[in-house]
Image: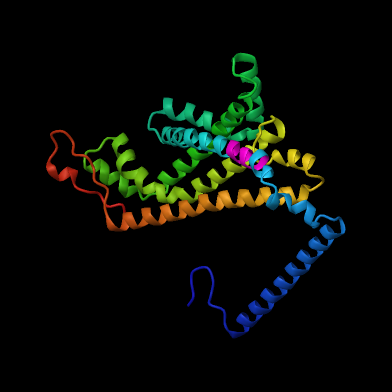
Amino acid sequence: MSSVLYDTPGPRAKRRNVVYTIAFLAVLALVAWWVLAALAEKNQLDADKWSPFVTDSEVWTTYLLPGLTETLKAAALSIVIALPLGAALGIGRLSDHRWVRVPVGAVVEFFRAIPVLLLMMFASQAYQEFTTVSSDFRPLYAVVTGLVLYNASVIAEVVRAGVLSLPRGQGDAAVALGLRKGQTMLYVLLPQAVTVMLPALVSQLVVIVKDTALGGAMLGFAELLSQNRQITANYGANTIATLTVIALIYIGINFALTSFAGRLEQRLRRGRKSGAVTLPAQAGAPEAKSEAVSGA
């Protein structure tokens, strides 16, 4: 069966694909063997470098779990603040009023153009110079501030693009029912745009989780990745083992996040197919104006 993007491969093409797959797997196996051999030569596969993560619970209770807690705390605070702020900025960029649209656009483009690490460093210095925030909490505040400013600007563009991707008829239908611009955005456009925006939003949330490591590298924030230095200092030169375990933890967190978002997206799509968005009736308007507007 052919599609717009490609034709269904014939017998010869299928054989070539099988050959390419076998060749790729063989090359991948050789690369994996070379990497493992190099690690073994440097004694990085010795049991004493990996066993602490299985036999010594203090590695987890003293280093990894506290670091993971700080990472999740910073990521959760950043997500909770950045999502509504980004949505508000995205809606502001869609405003019909120039005095709203232009300043909001300038703010979004400004913070989107600055590296998130630079925002964290500016925030840390600002908290040090102009506030009484304790040095114990300053790295967390700086990391969250930098992540919020940058990611809210990116989310604003995601929201704007998601709303603009909807068929124009959705907004026209809502206007024909007598809804104001704010009601059209709240009850018609945003609910439909959520499923369009969700993949990009999830990708940005994953970025937030990973970018907390920048605070550990430059600001002394005791997040998960920064625990690598403490573990290798107390359990020998097991940097490879420690980084591998930390990487697996990051993979587990992000996999759980994307899996949850995937199930949420499927549920939203089923909801759109099975139901309609009910609009509030306008004061003094005919009852027909409160009919449901389909999201399809």
Residue pictured at 49% horizontal, 45% vertical: 201
Residue 42 in the image, given as x and y percentages of width and height = 86, 55
* Among the 4 quarters of the image, the one containing residue 185: top left
Residue 59 in the image, given as x and y percentages of width and height = 69, 44
Screen quadrant of the C terminus:
bottom left
Would you say residue 70 sits in the magenta stretch?
Answer: yes
Residue 234 in the image, given as x and y percentages of width and height = 78, 40
* Among the 4 quarters of the image, the one containing residue 74: top right
Q: Is residue 202 above or below residue 214?
A: below
Would you say residue 229 sits in the magenta stretch?
Answer: no
The magenta span reads 63-71
Residue 80 visible in the snapshot: yes
Residue pictured at 31% horizontal, 44% vertical: 188
Q: How is the image coloured?
A: rainbow
Q: Would residue 97 appear left or right of 41 to someone viewing this image? A: left
Frontmost residue, 198 versus 108? 198
Q: Is residue 19 above or below residue 270?
A: below
* Among the 4 quarters of the image, the one containing residue 139: top right
- In the image, farthest residue toward the right: 41
Residue pictured at 60% horizontal, 29% vertical: 140
Q: Would residue 144 appear left or right of 172 to someone viewing this image? A: right
Magenta region's main secondary structure? helix
Residue 152 visible in the snapshot: no
Frontmost residue, 194 versus 131? 131
Residue 232 in the image, given as x and y percentages of width and height = 77, 43
Residue pictured at 73% horizontal, 67% vertical: 28
